Amino acid sequence: MLTFFISHVTLNIMFGEFNLIEKYFVGRQPSRKDVMLAAGDDCALVKVPEGMSLAISTDTLVAGTHFLKHANPAWVAHKALAANISDLAAMGATPAWVSLALTLPELDESWLAPFCDSFFKLADYFNIQLIGGDTTKGPLSLTLTVQGFVAHDKALRRDGAQVGDWIYVTGDLGDSRAGLDVILNTDLRDKPFAEDLEIAHYLATPRVLVGQALLGLASSAIDISDGLVADLKHILKRSDVGAHLELSDLPISSQLIQFLGGVDKAQQYALVSGEEYELCFTVPKQHKESIDSALAHCGCKVSCIGQIRPNGHFELSNKGKVVDWPVQGFDHFQQD
């Protein structure tokens, strides 16, 4: 690959280092037409389409912080790549290329095989080509850089929301937080839909089609990685505006309600659940009637949950009654 480097210090420790690269990473995908060079040199070479800007996102996942060391490697691969793709989706960008830096404590093919199978399955689904990376020995972690493109001056940003814009989210919210509860507390595995919610924590669906469809319609957008309230407040800060959210309009799954035993608790989870990788976006009044038809082909639920208000105003209500709930963003769990 773009040369997957392995330091000489680890050559005698990791079995078949170059065979590892050949077996699991090279030749797994057809080459995109815009990839000029992806193997055998110091850098990959790609062509950005004319009239497009390059969109780049990098994320690191560390065992014990973003996932448990004994987590299903296929789920870890999906989560890592989906998180990066979601960042591109939030900008309305088309994903194209990815590089992967993988640090392993030891060569464990029973871990690496399902990891790579899952990684390439998701990459192929979004037509993303792996163009390079790095492998080394050390504590389990992975860093991905995904690149894509979006038309000049058309990217969705966080600083475009205006007073009066409507606030939307995709999908259901709160499931990822409940799944994390199950991961961290095995006593919860007997509760209704515990397994489904754990899977939801790992196997998010990046909303690429939604982001692309919102170009020219949405005034701002962000993906929900730290929780709805925390991420919405990024938009509010960058746009110098406030917001009102209606809790009864939050999209919540029946599985989450049954798992938590009530709607109020589920609403609280929906406000703070991190690593959802759904989109939160704002839409000007003149485009509100166009949203349903514009997103009809995207295959996901879209819900209007509130409206942008003047700066300094942030309010939660439930069927018209103001609710004073303390809400905090998502904290990555720490686990040895």
Image (cartoon, rainbow, N blue to C red):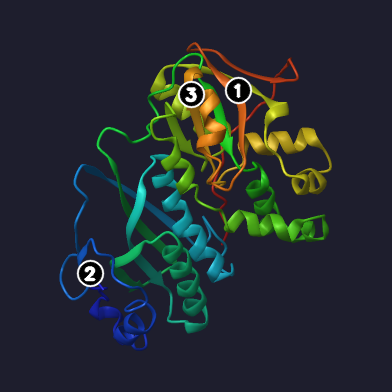
How many numbered marks does the figure carry?
Answer: 3
| Nearer to us in this view, 17 or 305 | 305
The residue pinned by badge 3 equals 287
Q: Quadrant of residue 18?
A: bottom left
| SS at mark 3 in the image | helix
- Rendered view: 205 above or below 283: below
Q: Position of residue 275 (x, y in %)?
A: 55, 47
Do the residues under discs 3 and 1 have CB atoms within 8 angstroms?
no
- Rendered view: 118 above or below 172: below
Q: Position of residue 324 (x, y in %)?
A: 70, 20
Q: Is residue 8 left or right of residue 293?
A: left
Which residue type does callout 1 highlight?
A: Gly
| Nearer to us in this view, 171 or 272 | 171
The residue pinned by badge 2 equals 38
Q: Quadrant of residue 172?
A: top right
Q: Residue furthest left?
A: 41
Which mark is first along the chain, 2 or 3? Answer: 2
Which mark is first along the chain, 1 or 3? Answer: 3
The residue pinned by badge 1 equals 306
Q: Position of residue 256 (x, y in %)?
A: 75, 46
